[in-house]
Image: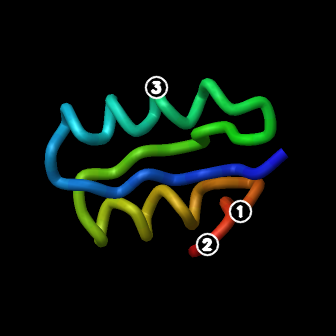
Amino acid sequence: MKHIMIVDDHPIVREGLANFIEIADDLTVVATASNGQEALEKLAALTRQPTLS
């Protein structure tokens, strides 16, 4: 299972990507963020680090 964090400044894009990713059996969205600072804060709080790419 790959853990994914979605970072985008548009809420509709984040939601759409999350819905699309959740369809895949081997992917799960563990967090979303609207900017880089929020992403770093949420990343630091995660116990399981997402796949970076």
Q: Nearer the viewer, residue 11 or 39?
A: 11
Please report whichever mark, 1 or 3, sits nearer to the chain's N-terminal start: 3
- Mark 1, residue position: 49
Which of label 2 and label 3 is nearer to you?
Answer: 3
Give coordinates of residue 50: x percent, y percent.
Answer: 67, 60
Amino acid under disc 3: Asn
Q: Amino acid at mark 1?
A: Gln
Q: CA distance from mark 1 to mark 3?
A: 20 Å
Determine which quarter of the picture holds residue 14. top left
Q: Secondary structure at mark 1?
A: loop
Q: Is residue 36 above or below residue 29?
A: below
Q: Name the foreground residue: 32 vs 19.
A: 19
Q: CA distance from mark 2 to mark 1?
A: 9 Å
Label at residue 52: 2
| Residue appearing at x 43%, y 70% in the figure | 40
Q: Is residue 1 above or below residue 22?
A: below
Q: Which mark is residue 19?
A: 3
Q: Position of residue 52 (x, y in %)?
A: 61, 72
> Looking at the image, do the residues carrying marks 2 and 1 touch, with CB atoms under 8 Å apart?
yes
Which quarter of the rendered picture does the N terminus lie within? top right
Drawn side of residue 28 relative to residue 35, left or right: right
In the shown orientation, is residue 37 left or right of residue 12? right
Earlier-in-chain disc, 2 versus 3: 3
